[in-house]
């Protein structure tokens, strides 16, 4: 198996040199078999956490209670090394009450979510595949390890992960796994907003975000202010820009922004993007320079490009011309915001205006300049300001 970094192999070799075994496990094995580059590597071992800490010179106790020690490699790469374990009852549909360390990797793999993630590998023993994960990978199928009702009852986040993997990998869902996920999907209400938003973000960036539709239809995201039954097929035609796809998702479903932002604990940067995008939805095929300047006064040109893509793809209205016009306006240095006026706030004060009046005058002058750029000179703006009655 290719694509395993030297420092990962070295950790596994060190474990063996000290009488233990170790394997790369989970998503990194799946990705390598799919000929993708893994984002990170996790290692599983029969060495107990205290053994791992004794073997490696630099470690961090990241999840010692659950058997995880982070080993810091010579080039300062953090690698999670976790002891084989089984899990007892789950207390909140997310976290096990206790974990029990075991010596057999098969027992460890049997607790994992899907067969394609229940894979382990090292160069000594090759691929460890106890549940048909490689076959499911070859047939592009997502199947729960063991009883899907048990898997999803243990950890409800696995339900959303199922749909996320289906979207990002373009895999189908095995029937029993799919049925159990939909039947138990309302249990997602027990999952933290941050985890739900993280999975939703990845799902919407996949090639098949429409897989989310039945989950929403069956009430899986109802507790987060997301309800309805609308097709999301067109989302895949948009660029893989999360803010744009999230905005388009909210618009397609006609969701209340404030409710979803609050319940999902959406980051401020994403909120601001969506709120600003909503402000410039007035742009259309007939929008002239004035309307485009209004839009540019509240957003960067990249957002105009995004709204152009949104309207063209989602609304079937090609307004790509608007983006080209916006580029021309910027290149020509035509003014559209207060900072581009030939008069400053101090200039307005010198004309006799005070306090709030200064801002009001600047706004009025900016509006006039958007309509007629030729008046953007100190003399003409002073003359125009002199005619303003507040």
Image: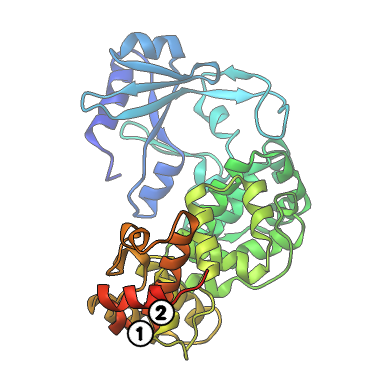
| Whether label 2 touches label 1, CB < 8 Å | yes
The N terminus - image quarter: top left
Disc 1 is placed on an element classified as loop
Q: Position of residue 329 (x, y in %)?
A: 30, 79
Front in this rendered view, residue 364 or 47: 364
Residue 247's place in the image compared with 305, above or below, is: above
Q: Residue drawn at (59%, 65%), measured in percent from left and top?
A: 249
Q: Residue drawn at (39%, 17%), measured in percent from left and top?
A: 60
Q: Position of residue 385 (x, y in %)?
A: 39, 73
Binning the other alpha carbons within 10 Å of mark 1 as few (below 14), some (14 to 19) or many (20 upward) gives few
Front in this rendered view, residue 26 or 79: 79
- Please state the total of marks drawn on the protein image: 2
| Res 139 visible | no
Front in this rendered view, residue 267 or 352: 352
- 273 relative position to 233: left or right: left
Residue at the disc numbered 2: 368
Point out which mark residue 372 bears. 1
Q: Residue drawn at (75%, 44%), measured in percent from left and top?
A: 187
Q: Residue drawn at (28%, 40%), measured in percent from left and top?
A: 4
Image color mode: rainbow
Q: Position of residue 125 (x, y in %)?
A: 37, 33
């Amino acid at each position: 198996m290719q694509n395993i970094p030297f420092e990962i192999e070295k950790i596994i070799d060190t474990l063996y040199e000290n009488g233990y075994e170790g394997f790369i496990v989970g998503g990194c094995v799946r990705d390598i078999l799919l000929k993708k580059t893994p984002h990170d590597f996790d290692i599983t071992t029969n060495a107990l956490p205290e053994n791992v800490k004794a073997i490696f010179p630099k470690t961090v106790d990241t999840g010692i209670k659950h058997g995880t020690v982070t080993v810091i490699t010579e080039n300062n790469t953090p690698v999670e090394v976790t002891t084989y374990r089984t899990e007892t009852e789950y207390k909140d549909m997310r976290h096990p009450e206790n974990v029990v360390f075991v010596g057999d990797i098969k027992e460890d793999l049997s607790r994992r979510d899907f067969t394609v993630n229940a894979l382990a590998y090292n160069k000594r023993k090759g691929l460890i595949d106890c549940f048909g994960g490689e076959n499911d990978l070859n047939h592009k199928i997502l199947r729960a390890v063991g009883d899907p009702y048990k898997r999803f009852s243990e950890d409800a986040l696995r339900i959303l992960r199922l749909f996320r993997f289906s979207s990002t990998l373009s895999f189908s869902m095995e029937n029993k796994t799919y049925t159990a996920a939909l039947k138990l999907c309302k249990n997602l209400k027990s999952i933290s907003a941050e985890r739900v938003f993280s999975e939703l973000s990845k799902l919407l960036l996949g090639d098949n975000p429409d897989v989310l539709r039945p989950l929403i239809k069956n009430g899986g995201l109802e507790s987060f202010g997301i309800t309805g039954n609308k097709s999301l097929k067109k989302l895949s035609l948009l660029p893989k820009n999360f803010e744009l796809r999230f905005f388009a998702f909210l618009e397609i479903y006609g969701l209340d922004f404030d409710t979803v932002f609050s319940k999902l604990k959406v980051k401020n940067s994403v909120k601001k993007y969506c709120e600003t995008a909503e402000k410039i939805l007035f742009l259309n095929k007939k929008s002239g320079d004035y309307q485009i300047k209004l839009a540019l006064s509240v957003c960067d040109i990249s957002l105009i490009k995004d709204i152009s893509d949104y309207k063209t793809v989602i609304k079937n209205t090609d307004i790509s011309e608007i983006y080209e016009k916006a580029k021309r306006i910027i290149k020509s240095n035509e003014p559209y915001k207060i900072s581009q006026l030939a008069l400053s706030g101090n200039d307005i004060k010198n004309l006799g205006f005070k306090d709030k009046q200064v801002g009001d005058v600047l706004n009025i002058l900016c509006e006039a300049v958007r309509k007629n750029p030729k008046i953007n000179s100190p003399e003409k703006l002073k003359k125009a300001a002199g005619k303003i009655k507040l």
